[in-house]
Amino acid sequence: MKVTEVTIYTLKMRMKTPFVTSFGAVQDKTVLVIKAEDESGIVGWGEGVAFDAPSYTEETAKTTLHMLEEFLIPMLLHKKLNHPDEVNELFKPIRRNKMAKAAIEGAIWDLYAKLNNMSLAQAIGGIKKKVEIGISVGLQPTNEGLFGIIEDYIGQGYKRVKVKIKPGQDIELIRAIRARFGDLPLMADANSAYTMEDLPLLKALDEFNLLMIEQPLAYDDLVEHALLQKELTTPICLDESINSVEDMKRAVLLGSCRVVNLKIARVGGITEAKRIHDYCLEHGISVWCGGMLEAGIGRAQAVAISSLGGFSLPGDTAASSHYWEEDIIEPEVTVENGFIQTPKKAGIGYTVKQSFIEQIAERKILLT
Ligand code: OSB
Ligand code: MG
């Protein structure tokens, strides 16, 4: 493979409803679409998924665009590659900037799979014909509103429900959901909203038999999560705190979690995500695939990685229609009885709607 030109499209996509977490709301999602063309004319597609504000991680849509334009894509252009794993190695001199790296690395994986006439899932080593899906529901203004949404998604077959919590919207909220929905497979995601001062409250949540509690403490902490896990019967799932296989090793050494929410973008790409998956399998950590409110290309990558054998719990990769009036791929991603079929076609397995992208793009940047 040798990439001879890369096009970056910047899109602003309006979500059907704003997604609210303990750190804020997202309604207009900036989507970077990355098109990488090989010397043979074959095209690979990637997606930049960072948010506009640096509140989930330190990256933003603008910092990822900057890194891609000024550093990452120039490093990659006209370089001969035998395998997409080499991209991870190539980018090692650039510190962090994981979502920027993942955006272009994903395009190289798609290109590689297409050049070898394999599905992305196959290229990664995926084995599952369909992947199991849950729903992540943002904070809602009222409990009644939240109950309506949960009812709707259970009715559609989603396999588990994740709700967001934050101080003031936590224990009574979970109690109310349990009272209303009984033993529904339920978990809570705090997006780092608590500290060890909240230990009594976090311990009190044990009563509700949550599947797990996601990222209760600081985004950059592993030590206090380990102390907390010793105090809780509920498994801790780390999201923000795991950004590399090295982080995962430290978390295992310390006992910081029993579960990991794996997002390709957060860890710098598919190669690193696969390494974390393999490490977790060997060390008894459960793995599932999280979401970044992605458009279709990122969603397709999530489906592919979820087809790896170690993804043993339902992921957050909901149907395209949960987020968008119109997605950038066809067919759109659909969920039936709580499963997405792993596509068999070459590459990401969905067709990218280039004319739709051209039509809605705010900017188009060509790098050669
Ligand atoms: O913590 O997993 C998270 C959305 C935005 C930022 C952070 C998170 C989330 C989600 C939604 O939980 C996942 C999705 O539906 O894409
Ligand atoms: Mg999370």
Image (cartoon, rainbow, N blue to C red):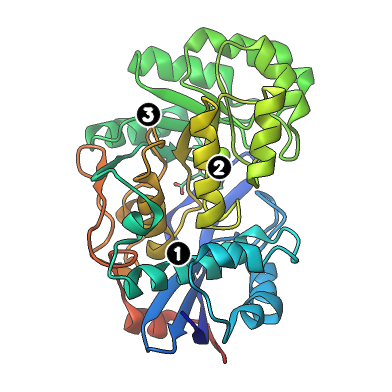
As drawn, is 193 to the left or to the right of 237?
right
The amino acid beneath tag 3 is Phe
The amino acid beneath tag 2 is Ile
Callout 2: 10 Å neighbours few (<14), some, many (20+)? Answer: many
Which residue does the numbered mark 2 point to in the structure image?
276
Residue 189's quadrant in the figure? top right
> Do the residues bearing badges 2 and 3 touch, measured as CB atoms within 8 Å?
no
Residue 107 on image: x %, y %: 46, 71
Res 72 label: none
Instruction: State whether residue 229 is above or below residue 7.
Output: above
**What is the quadrant of the C terminus in the image?**
bottom right
Mark closer to the observer (1, 2): 2
Q: Residue at x 68, y 12 (%)?
A: 230
Which residue does the numbered mark 3 point to in the structure image?
147
Instruction: State whether residue 211 is above or below residue 162.
Output: above
Instruction: State whether residue 119 is above or below residue 111.
Output: above
> Do the residues bearing badges 1 and 2 touch, measured as CB atoms within 8 Å?
no
Q: Secondary structure at mark 2?
A: helix
Q: CA distance from mark 1 to mark 2?
A: 32 Å
Callout 1: 10 Å neighbours few (<14), some, many (20+)? Answer: some
Mark 1 within 8 Å of ligand 1, using the beta carbon:
no
Is residue 358 among what the camera can see? yes
Image quadrant of ligand 2 equals top right
Nearer-N-terminus badge (2/3): 3
Q: CA distance from mark 2 to mark 3?
A: 35 Å
Q: Secondary structure at mark 3?
A: helix
Mark closer to the observer (2, 3): 2
